[in-house]
Image (cartoon, grey):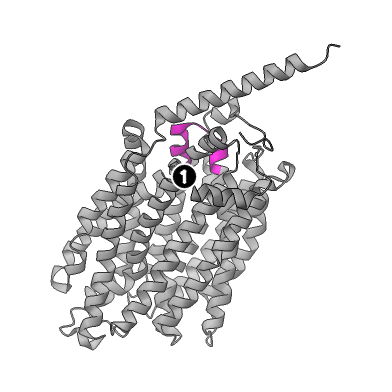
Amino acid sequence: MPENSKTFSSSASELSRVTTSVLHTYGSVAFPLAAAFIALQVIIPTFYAETTGLSLTTIGLVLLAARLWDLFTDPIVGTLSDRTPARFGKRKAWMVMATPIIMLATWQLFVPPADADWTHLLVWTFLIYVGGTMAIVPMNAWSAELSSDYDERSRISGTRAGYGLLGTIVALLLTALASGETNELQQPLRWIALMAIATLAITATLTALRVPDRSPTALPDNTLKAALKLLRTPGPFRQLLVSFLFNSVGNAIPATLFLLYVAYVLQVPEMAGKLLFMYFLCAAISVPFWIKLAKYFGKHQTWIFAILLTCVFFCAAPFLSYETRTVFYAIVLFTGITAGADLVLPVAIKADLIEWDEYSNGYKRPGVFFAIWGTTTKLAFGLAIGIAFPLLEFAGFSTGTAKTGSANAEEVSTASGIIALAFLYGGPSIFFKILASWLMRGYPITRTEHERIRNALQERKTTTESTQEREQPAG
């Protein structure tokens, strides 16, 4: 065990069930953040391609550059939040600072001026990602600190995911109210911006006032160096992180291409908003089911099952067209159900590694852990758009006016471009998800192992306290 660290074991308060009031107050912040970021990931790329004259390659590279910057900001924010004095609230202080940044960047990005160019897209995307990092990384660490119980963490992540899905659904419902053409998304984006800004101001304030935030940390002298060592060392942290990266790439590519796929492959652009709404509604409804399933079969086993089930449903996606569009509607429904597992279980699995790290390495550093986690998520979406959009343009795909039931694909793009879009939407996702599930085989931190680690930490704490009492001088 490192000499320069202290060991903090879970207190009785950490092991207790989180009250309903605290649970929902904490989870509510996910509503505006999810509404803003689903629009940023799914709608903004297509909106800027249709309305600004920027090429697909330019948009892809700009958004990738903004995402890659998070490789630096995420670890910095995670480290600083771990080191923030507890009297300020290690996590809530960062959320409060991030709120005005996210609000301003959301408005500028979602309601751009008529002459917006690539610099406008780059600056405000960069700022919304920085603000998002300042809020989301500490809040993820906060979730692990609210309780250290194996199943209670599923409940915490499930509640937060539920609010996030609600924000996503409302944002997509606002999008569905548009006419359905990809070049008529300006008004829905304005509605989403106003909703996200107003609800973020309310929920962030309530969370800062009502949710406890006093958990101690135990950090190495060189936090970033120790984190890099953690990445280099084989173990459950690296196993989970790599699996999560591949699964996230498998999710990010079809998410990035969804609007284009529906408009140009299926040729039903008016259905895009409705299908997205159905997808996330199914995800939201399925969250309690996945939490209950994980309680019986274990979190990582349930997650693997959901990943493989998604692959089965997704096999037909590269081969569909206007005539077989109803098959895609079924795919959206069933993959929406499996998406609920992706939203809840990996985060809950990740939280259990806080105790593993404390037991194995002597550190308690949830901020750094979730910073690396957040970087992985953002890298996956950045790579998806940075790779997919240029490949589409190289294959001859270009945006235009997608006509419902158009007989000639060439009316909106070249035939090779349409084929490339269909393949990129479905093929890589299956590959990356199968790889992710394969890498998760034999994951060691089960419920039994986590309970053993917690008991060992408690025993270590008791022994340390007894030794300190014996060594105290009499009188």
Magenta segment includes 206: no
* Mark 1 lies on residue: 237
Q: Position of residue 302 (x, y in %)?
A: 31, 40
Quadrant of the image containing the N terminus: top right
Q: Is 99 displayed left or right of 405 in the figure?
A: right
Residue at image point 83% right, 11% down: 474
Magenta segment includes 155: yes
Is residue 416 shown to the viewer in this render?
yes
Judging depth in this view, the residue of 60 and 452 nearest the camera is 452
Residue at image point 68% right, 20% down: 465
Tally of marks? 1
Q: Residue 134 sits in which quadrant? A: bottom right
Q: Is residue 41 above or below residue 78?
A: below
Residue at image point 32% right, 39% down: 301
Residue at the right extreme of this rendering: 475
Q: Position of residue 178 (x, y in %)?
A: 37, 73
Q: Is residue 166 above or below residue 114?
A: above
Q: What residue type is labelled 1?
A: Phe
Q: Residue 188 sits in which quadrant? A: bottom left
Q: Residues within 10 Å of mark 1 (few under 14, many from 20)?
A: many
Which SS class for mark 1? helix
Q: In this view, does 62 lie above or below 475?
A: below
Q: Position of residue 142 (x, y in %)?
A: 58, 44
Is residue 205 shown to the viewer in this render?
no
Q: What range of the chain is rendered magenta?
A: 143-156
Quadrant of the image containing the C terminus: top right
Examine the residues drawn in magenta and state their main secondary structure.
Answer: helix
Q: Where is residue 352 in the image (x, y as percent from the top left)?
A: 48, 37
Residue at the top extreme of this rendering: 474
